[in-house]
Amino acid sequence: MRVLTTVAELQALADAEHAAGRRVALVPTMGALHAGHLSLVEVARARVDRVWVSTFVNPTQFDDPADLARYPRTPERDLRACREAGVDLVFAPSAAELYPDAADTWVEVGALARPLCGRTRPGHFRGVATVVAKLLLAARPRLAVFGEKDFQQLAVIRRMVRDLLLDVEIVGAPIVREPDGLALSSRNQNLCPESRAQAVVLCRALDRAEAEHRAGETDAGRLLAGVRQEIAKASRAEIDYAELRDPVALEPSPPRLRGPALLALAVFFRCGAAPDAPRVRLIDNRVLRPRRERARREG
Amino acid sequence: MRVLTTVAELQALADAEHAAGRRVALVPTMGALHAGHLSLVEVARARVDRVWVSTFVNPTQFDDPADLARYPRTPERDLRACREAGVDLVFAPSAAELYPDAADTWVEVGALARPLCGRTRPGHFRGVATVVAKLLLAARPRLAVFGEKDFQQLAVIRRMVRDLLLDVEIVGAPIVREPDGLALSSRNQNLCPESRAQAVVLCRALDRAEAEHRAGETDAGRLLAGVRQEIAKASRAEIDYAELRDPVALEPSPPRLRGPALLALAVFFRCGAAPDAPRVRLIDNRVLRPRRERARREG
């Protein structure tokens, strides 16, 4: 497995792979790799000849410097995990390498990036779109794989790639969960044992809404009330947002759901009993599909 | 000469040219071609195997819809001029082709795009950076040539290309002038005879500042006073800006010039005697260089 830290080396290798006719997939991560990331590697491997993983922790997508400082970093473990997963190349540049010489160019997606996490984390998706554009331009992969846990991120990146005429296929991969249902996230490492135990309410809330929806409930208000009730069972949870939105345009769902609806959750978990204890923000989501579409997809 | 109108065709041809080892230069224009554009073609031809010209009039860089409506369009003449100049390909997409399906991704350069034309024309450089990024990503040229008349545009594009890690060389080409000194611009077509005659004050103001600077004047205020005096000789001229700035960072020059200084002018010319007659905005610039640097460049 190769480990590269400069854009020039990566571009030269990309050229060589193209010239040799080998298809490359990029899996952009921020390190602190877990089984969710490794599932992206598997999705990539099934499609291409070479799987490249980037582990750059992108400072420009953190709206809060404290959040950036706390973001888990496990570089040695990441390299080992990639090697064991048969990754061909890890790209681990410095911030100065990706943002050289007072870099001051930003890629911004409009309407899709405004609601949900875009509202809570101003500038977040600008940072995401910018760094992903740079990584795609540096690595020039045939395809790039992102997890569906970051549903809005995936939508923003798809839109950016289409709008900028980037010649790369964006592939979404299903959420990977712990046995109790908690979606895998690098941020889970920052949960204290009690908030970790309580964090399962995210998935339970999604399960409840999905069950009610399958049973015929299409009233958005009632579905969201059930979600809030589930999350309220966790004493350390505080809802950032719980919303039903159109899964493509991310516009608010109508009061009575007709088509598929994205149920998107962001919840803070306080780590400690004190009211000013540090908080970990987790997200999760599920697309609720009308019965007919469900039958079509499952059948 | 080929004429293409779709991104897919252009990308396919770019792939074929790469595979054949042929170097391509792109000359992005907005049509209404004049000898200035053709000089860019010549600069390109000296460096590569294939010269491609785009003639897309980019709506997103016009802050004023009336300005977009008035912008000259001469598609047949443009094709003829390109054919005669030995251009290999003209790319003339529709707006829907470059901004498909409610495109909503924007490339924005920060500090460099704020002063000068960026202040007068809000959103202008966002539109420029976005469309140039798209054109570069669609055509994937080895190099792209832009005129130095649009000095700030050239600076913004250089910065964007470097920041986004785009693998293309940006080449600036010298301003081409009419015999009386007026810098060639597609907008010159919109001048009435009287404002056309008066527009020569732009170049005269630059000449005067350059002469005074060569004679030892380094006081920015006095140089600009001379510029304003020259422009005031034109009864139909109204200064948008007349500024001395650092030619790299575009920051304001110090009161006493030390290094090279960009003298940048934007002037409205009223076309007609009425105070509310339509106005044509022209820009021009010159870099004033200290004697020592001048000797080095000229010697």
Image: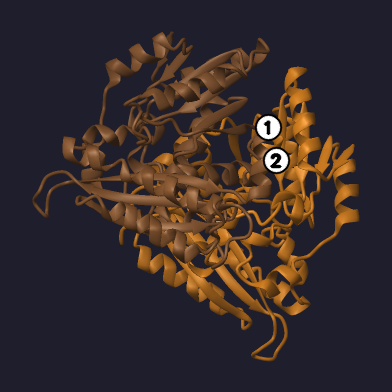
Chain colours: A orange, B brown
**Image height check: is A272 above or below B126?**
below
Which numbered disc covers residue B296?
2
Residue A223 percent location from the top left of the image:
42, 65
Q: Disc 2 or disc 1, which is closer to the eye?
A: 2
- At label 1, which amino acid type do we have? Pro
Query: Which of the 4 quarters of the picture holds residue B200?
Result: top left
Q: Mark 2, chain letter?
A: B
**Image height check: is B216 above or below A137?**
below
**Image height check: is B103 above or below B37?**
below
- Which quarter of the rendering shows the N terminus of chain A? top right
Asked if residue A249 can be seen in this view, the reply is no
**Image height check: is B122 above or below A231?**
above
Query: Which of the 4 quarters of the picture holds residue A192?
Result: bottom right
Residue B268 percent location from the top left of the image:
27, 50
The residue where tag 1 is placed is A141
Q: Residue furthest front?
A: B215
Q: Nearer the viewer, residue B277 or B179?
A: B179
